[in-house]
Image (cartoon, rainbow, N blue to C red):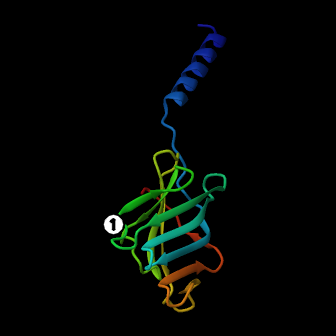
Amino acid sequence: MKPTTIATLLATAATAAAAASPVVLPRASGPFQLSDISAQVSTTTNTGSMYLIVVDTNEHDIATGCNVTWTPTPGLTPGTVVPCDYAAYALSFPDGLYADIADIYLVIETTAENILSESANITLDAAASDSPWICGGVEEGVGETKCEYDGFVDVVVGSGV
């Protein structure tokens, strides 16, 4: 065989081997950045709403709004998943979501539409010392409560949901 033929065969074999190798995606390393976090509940009208913006620093800083509405009584059952505006992201509430919005445990997760499987969790607890999750009455005596997060928060992301 000629040396050029051998070189061509080796180059072709190397290209075929590289193409056959599985694609390994990087693990998530950056946080989800949450901002504009707020929630409001009215026991008078039995309505609740929560809103936040999620920025995924692992996916070119993609930002999406997440809007949750629920009926505080009976509430959202534990494990309920609510899609965000961009369907590659969702919120879930492992402990449920009820009228007491002063203490909320939520998980931000990617869906099957996202190339990376990521999840992160956060507890918003107004009773914690120096908590940026601040709650108060909107209209005293009307049965309304509103909570807001003072600033933004980086939430550590893990691989897998």
Does residue 118 sit above or below 128 in this rendering? above
Residue designated by label 1? 77
Mark 1: which amino acid?
Answer: Thr
Left or right side of 21 for 81: left
Q: Is residue 150 above or below residue 93?
A: below
- Expressed as whole percent of the image width and height from the top left, the position of residue 63 reads 64, 57
How packed mark 1 is, by other alpha carbons closer than 10 Å (few <14, some 14-19, many 20 or more), is few
Residue 56: horizontal and vertical position, in percent?
60, 58
Q: Measuring 50% from the left and 69% from the top, which residue is drawn there?
A: 49
Residue drawn at x 37%, y 67% is 76
Q: Foreground residue, 64 or 60?
A: 64
Q: Tell which of 152 and 86 is nearer to you.
A: 86
Look at the picture and state if 111 lies above or below 138. above
Q: Is residue 37 visible?
A: yes
Quadrant of the image occupied by residue 92 = bottom left
| 112 or 46: nearer the viewer | 46
Q: Which quadrant of the figure contains the C terminus?
A: bottom left
Residue under the image location 61 percent in, 52 percent down: 59
Give x and y (percent) for residue 36. 63, 70
Q: Is residue 92 above or below residue 124?
A: above
Residue at the top extreme, as displayed: 1
